[in-house]
Each structure stands twice: as structure tokens, then as C-alpha cells.
């Protein structure tokens, strides 16, 4: 008898879960609070972020290590500010990996949060 009761409980929970999923999908398809969603993901111009791993992105001084001046020299590649052109990536946000001093190349173990690693440039470059 306990097995049958257990099966009924599981079936009831499955039905409840299915209802939550169906109503959730229906609400998602209806849109946000305003009911307006972009037709294509490319129409959403507010969330286009480009992450830059400074160490290997662009080297401006020829030492083989990317730096902040190299990033500055290539900003037009990321976004030239003209939405009518297609010569850039069209990103409107940049996410830099850490640029603070650190004993490793990836800089995620920062030793001084108030400075810029000298191999990347200066605080003025930043």
C-alpha cells in the first residue's frame, strides 16, 4: 500500500512541476513586464560585452606582453562608435581581466589593488 501512495505523491508532484514549467514558459514567451522583447538577440544592444585578457590582447611596446596602451590602440576594433558600420565588433562594454600587480601572468592573485602592474602600463594609461 505504501508503494502506491508513494507513486501517487510522485505523480502529483510531477503534475505540479509540469504546471509550473508550462506557466513559466507561457510567461517567458509573453515577454517582460512591458511585453517587449528583441526579435533577435543581436537587437539587444545593451548587453554586448567584450572581455579582454590584457596579457595577450595587444602589445604596444614590443616586449611580447599585452598592455593597456595596446588595448587603447584597438578600441576601434571593439567599437568604433558608429552603429551603421560593420567594421567593428559592435560591443558597448569592455571587461578587463585584472591589471593590478601580481606574481602570476593571469593577475587573479592581486598583491596591490591600488596600483597597475608595470608590465601593463601606468595608472595614467589605465
Image: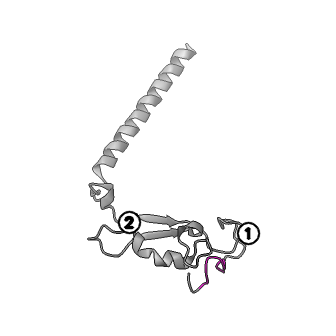
Q: Main secondary structure of the magenta part?
A: loop
Residue situated furthest bottom in the rendering: 124
- In the image, residue 96 sits, relative to residue 41, either above or below, namely below
- In the image, residue 6 sits, relative to residue 52, either above or below, namely above
Query: Is 103 displayed left or right of 7 in the figure?
Result: right
- The quadrant of the picture occupied by the N terminus is top right
Q: Position of residue 97 (x, y in %)?
A: 58, 67
The residue that appears at 37% across and 44% down in the rendered structure is: 24
Residue situated furthest top in the rendering: 1
Mark 1 surroundings within 10 Å by alpha-carbon count, few (fewer than 14), some (14 through 19), many (20 or more): few
- In the image, residue 7 sits, relative to residue 63, either above or below, namely above
Q: Position of residue 84 (x, y in %)?
A: 26, 71
Q: Nearer the viewer, residue 36 or 79?
A: 79
Tell me the number on the disc at residue 59.
none
The residue that appears at 43% across and 35% down in the rendered structure is: 17
Q: Position of residue 37 (x, y in %)?
A: 29, 56
For the question of whether residue 32 can be seen, the reply is: no
Q: Secondary structure at mark 2?
A: loop
Q: Nearer the viewer, residue 37 or 49?
A: 49
Q: Which residues are magenta?
A: 114-123
Q: What color scheme is it?
A: one colour
Q: Nearer the viewer, residue 40 or 122?
A: 122
Q: Which residue is mark 2?
A: 89
Q: Which residue is mark 1?
A: 103
Amino acid at each position: 500500500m505504501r508503494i502506491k501512495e508513494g507513486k501517487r505523491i510522485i505523480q502529483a508532484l510531477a503534475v505540479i512541476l509540469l504546471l509550473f514549467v508550462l506557466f513559466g514558459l507561457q510567461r517567458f514567451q509573453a515577454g517582460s513586464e512591458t511585453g517587449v522583447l528583441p526579435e533577435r538577440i543581436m537587437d539587444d544592444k545593451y548587453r554586448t560585452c567584450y572581455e579582454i585578457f590584457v596579457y595577450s590582447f595587444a602589445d604596444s611596446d614590443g616586449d611580447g606582453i599585452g598592455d593597456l596602451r595596446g588595448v587603447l590602440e584597438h578600441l576601434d576594433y571593439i567599437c568604433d562608435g558608429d552603429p551603421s558600420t560593420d567594421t567593428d565588433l559592435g560591443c558597448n562594454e569592455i571587461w578587463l581581466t585584472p591589471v593590478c600587480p601580481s606574481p602570476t601572468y593571469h593577475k587573479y592573485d592581486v598583491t596591490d589593488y591600488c596600483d597597475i602592474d608595470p608590465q601593463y602600463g601606468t595608472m595614467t594609461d589605465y
